[in-house]
Amino acid sequence: MRHLIYTLIAILIAIFTQSCVAVNVASNKVSEIKAKTVNNPHVLAKGTKFSNNKEQKKWSNSTGDSYFSANFAEFSGTAYMELTVSKPLILRVSHNINISSGTLKMILEDSKSNAVFSKSINGDSKESIQYQIPDSGTYYLKMTGNDTDGSYFCQWEEL
């Protein structure tokens, strides 16, 4: 019961501060990662979506106009954000990924499934990378796991 009350308090705080609250479903701890306020006038985000029909039982996530995050146990499949870019630009993608079991693959790809970036992570990773987005169109920021435990926070910013 106490865990439920703490979780509800954290969610209310997140709503009022516009931050991302993620519940670590594997250990039942609440952690807060504050999303940076960014201006992305040429990037419209939609998500979190899943590209398979497998139910994610031990999954919690949060999304906003410039970020998505999740905590998970036994995650298998692909979760992604759809980013519609209205003009060529430079996009900075910052992530904080913590994997305790398995591997998480982070992929940024265009609408023709061409990878702009791809990285496999099987531990902790925290970095910011800039990508040249050469054309307007739809891009997908994907996280793929196979029986993976951990969490991620990912935010993008138009430069």
Image (cartoon, helix red, strand yellow):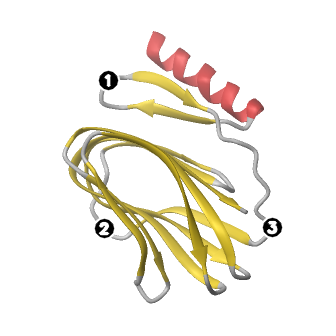
The quarter of the displayed image where residue 50 is located: bottom left
Say few, some or many: other residues with alpha carbon within 10 Å of mark 2 (under 14 / 14 to 19 / 20 or more). few
Q: What element carries label 1?
A: loop
Q: Is residue 9 visible?
A: yes
Q: Which mark is residue 53?
A: 2
Q: Do the residues labelled 3 and 1 touch (CB within 8 Å)?
A: no
Above-or-below relation of 2 to 66: above
Picture quadrant of residue 58: top left
Asked if residue 75 lies left or right of residue 113, the reply is left
In primary-sequence order, the first of circles 2 and 3 is 3
Residue type at mark 1 is Ser
Work out how far the residue at label 3 is from the one at label 1, CA to CA, in angstroms. 38 Å
Identified at 79% across, 57% down, the residue is 39
Residue 111 spot, x, y in % from top left = 49, 85
Rendering coords of residue 4 (x, y %): 48, 19
Instruction: Assign the N terminus to one quadrant of the image.
Output: top left
Which SS class for mark 2? loop
